[in-house]
């Protein structure tokens, strides 16, 4: 199983952005890193046309009639772990 390598990134935020980040952490109950990742994803969806993003072209590839579980995007890690342990 291939695990994506994560690299630390240092970001300087003024007080307003620090306060926004803290508020989002408390309201959503997720880490600062996850909030920043989600923000990058949202910005990328607005800026990068889906047809030029090969990862976005995978969406819907299985079609409506596939027997894949409906929560695969949320439970991706669990499914990959289960599948790799079956090998």
Image (cartoon, rainbow, N blue to C red):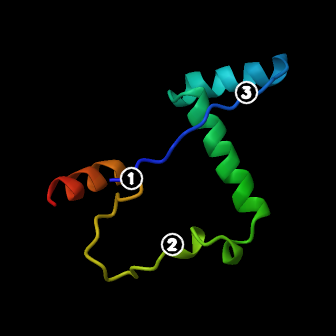
Q: Residue at x 50, y 27 (%)?
A: 29
Q: Given this view, does label 1 or label 3 mark the residue nearer the observer?
A: 1
Q: Is residue 2 above or below residue 87?
A: above
Q: Given this view, does label 2 or label 1 mark the residue nearer the observer?
A: 1
> Residue extending furthest top?
15
Residue 8 lies in what quarter of the image?
top right
> Disc 2 on helix, strand or loop?
loop
Q: Residue at x 75, y 20 (%)?
A: 18
Q: Disc 2 versus disc 1: distance between alpha carbons?
A: 21 Å
> Disc 1 on helix, strand or loop?
loop
Q: Within 10 Å of the Cα at label 2, are there few (<14), some (14-19), or many (20+) other Cα atoms?
A: few
Q: Is residue 62 above or below residue 49?
A: below
Residue under numbered circle 2 = 59
The reply to whether callout 1 and callout 3 are in contact (CB within 8 Å) is no
Q: Is residue 52 left or right of residue 56?
A: right
Residue 83 lies in what quarter of the image?
bottom left
Residue under numbered circle 3 = 10
Image coordinates for residue 51, horizontal then vertical, percent = 68, 78
Q: Is residue 80 left or right of residue 60?
A: left
Image quarter (top left, top right, bottom left or bottom right) of the C terminus = bottom left
Q: Is residue 46 above or below residue 77?
A: below
**Mark 2 vs mark 1: which is more N-terminal?**
1
Image coordinates for residue 66, horizontal then vertical, percent = 30, 79
> Residue extending furthest left?
86
**Mark 1 vs mark 3: which is more N-terminal?**
1
Residue 67 lies in what quarter of the image?
bottom left
Q: Disc 2 versus disc 3: distance between alpha carbons?
A: 31 Å
Image coordinates for residue 32, horizontal then vertical, percent = 60, 27
**Mark 2 vs mark 3: which is more N-terminal?**
3
Q: Given this view, does label 2 or label 3 mark the residue nearer the observer?
A: 3
Q: Is residue 43 left or right of residue 58?
A: right
Residue under numbered circle 1 = 2
């Amino acid at each position: 199983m291939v695990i994506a390598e994560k690299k630390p990134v240092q970001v300087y935020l003024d007080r307003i952005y620090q306060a926004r980040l803290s508020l989002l952490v408390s309201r959503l109950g997720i880490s600062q890193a996850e909030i920043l990742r989600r923000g990058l994803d949202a910005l990328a969806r607005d800026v990068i046309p889906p047809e030029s993003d090969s990862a976005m072209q995978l969406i819907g590839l299985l079609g409506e009639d596939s027997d894949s579980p409906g929560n695969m995007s949320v439970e991706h890690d669990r499914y990959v772990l289960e599948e790799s342990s079956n090998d």
